[in-house]
């Protein structure tokens, strides 16, 4: 039998792009049966009407849920918590465009996986008109818990996972202590299972003024954005999630000798203490330059 795939899309004030994105998902070809579930997160524009029109155009293939405004974390976790009865699950933003073969690549990779597994890939970053201007990160180093505790190169709009990982993600959690949902998911996959990273970009990732979370347009742009964010202390929001992730997954982190390094990293409250932590700190980002910026931000109390 063909595997059943459920795509979970959270929409908020997305009337301008939702139809194009939904069509790029629903026209994916391959040996699978695909359903698109759209949750409107309390939009104030015509997104509900667009979503209902899509459900009417694609009966049995598009499901529409109207919800209160929870923010992107709460909305995606609500969708994930309500998911069941499929073989594989994918997450989608409202304003991208999926390239042909994306779902087929994800299904092919996950069918071969044993245990909790997450599929991810890069994207082409684009302007508002979907003209490519750059690319999101490729995998340069192994994606391990020591990496996912401080960086996510598996953005939610490219994440697919199996039922084993779904069960872990659905474990009750305090969303207020989670900075970004996709980093949480990648952390669980790296800690308890596998991340299957496909180096081929399979999404046109639209960058525009209404993005909830943006991305640098090219390598320099990404590094400048990361560096500015780091020196502005925005990494402190991830520290809240890092502490909560360690609290919720202590036994598994202790098995990998990572729990105490997390505590040392989080509790160092002076330049000298942070310097000593960095002497043995196991955490890293994908490129050496990114790791340098991360360590510099931490050393000066900006992470």
Image (cartoon, helix red, strand yellow):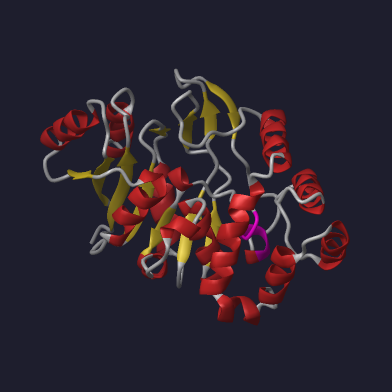
Residue pushed farthest front?
269
Q: Nearer the viewer, residue 279 or 256?
A: 279
Q: In the drawing, does residue 37 fall left or right of residue 247?
A: left
Q: Position of residue 118 (x, y in %)?
A: 47, 59
Q: Quadrant of residue 40?
A: top left
Q: Nearer the viewer, residue 242 or 92?
A: 242
Q: How many marks?
A: 0
Query: Magenta span: helix, strand or loop, mainly?
Result: helix
**Which residue is found at the position 48% from the left and 23% from the top?**
209
Q: Position of residue 242 (x, y in %)?
A: 60, 62
Q: Position of residue 34 (x, y in %)?
A: 25, 48
Task: Please state the extent of the stretch shown in magenta in the rendering.
Answer: 146-150
**Which residue is found at the position 38% from the left and 48% from the top?**
91
The answer to whether residue 30 shows anywhere in this view is: no
**Which residue is found at the position 50% from the left and 37% from the top?**
213
**Which residue is found at the position 52% from the left and 37% from the top?**
123
Q: In the drawing, does residue 128 fall left or right of residue 262?
A: left
The answer to whether residue 251 shows anywhere in this view is: yes
Residue 149 belongs to the span the image colors magenta? yes
User: Considering only vertical position in the picture, is 232 above or below 78?
Assistant: above
Q: Position of residue 177 (x, y in %)?
A: 49, 59
Q: In the rendered image, which quarter contains the N terminus?
A: bottom left
């Amino acid at each position: 039998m063909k595997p059943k795939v459920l795509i979970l899309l959270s929409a908020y004030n997305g009337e301008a792009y939702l139809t194009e994105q939904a069509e790029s998902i629903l026209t994916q070809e391959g040996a699978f049966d695909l359903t698109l579930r759209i949750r409107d997160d309390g939009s104030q524009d015509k997104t509900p009407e667009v979503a209902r029109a899509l459900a009417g155009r694609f009966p049995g293939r598009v499901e529409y849920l109207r919800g209160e405004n929870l923010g992107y974390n709460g909305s995606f976790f609500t969708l994930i918590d309500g998911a069941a009865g499929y073989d594989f699950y994918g997450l989608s933003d409202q304003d991208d465009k999926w390239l042909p073969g994306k779902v087929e690549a994800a299904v092919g990779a996950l069918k071969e996986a044993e245990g909790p597994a997450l599929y991810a890939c890069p994207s082409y970053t684009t302007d508002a008109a979907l003209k490519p201007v750059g690319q999101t990160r490729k995998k340069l180093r192994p994606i391990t818990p020591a990496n996912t505790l401080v960086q996510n190169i598996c953005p939610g709009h490219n994440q697919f996972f199996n039922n084993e990982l779904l069960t872990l993600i659905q474990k009750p959690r305090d969303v207020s202590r989670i900075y970004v949902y996709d980093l949480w998911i990648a952390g669980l996959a790296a800690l308890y299972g596998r991340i299957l990273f496909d180096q081929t970009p399979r999404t046109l990732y639209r960058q525009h003024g209404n993005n909830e979370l943006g991305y640098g347009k090219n390598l320099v742009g990404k590094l400048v954005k990361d560096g500015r964010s780091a020196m502005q202390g925005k990494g402190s929001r991830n520290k809240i999630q890092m502490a909560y992730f360690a609290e919720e997954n202590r036994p598994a982190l202790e098995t990998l000798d990572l729990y105490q390094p997390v505590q040392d990293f989080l509790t160092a409250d002076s330049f000298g203490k942070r310097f000593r932590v960095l002497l043995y700190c196991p955490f890293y980002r994908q490129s050496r330059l990114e790791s340098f910026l991360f360590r510099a931000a931490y050393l000066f109390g900006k992470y």
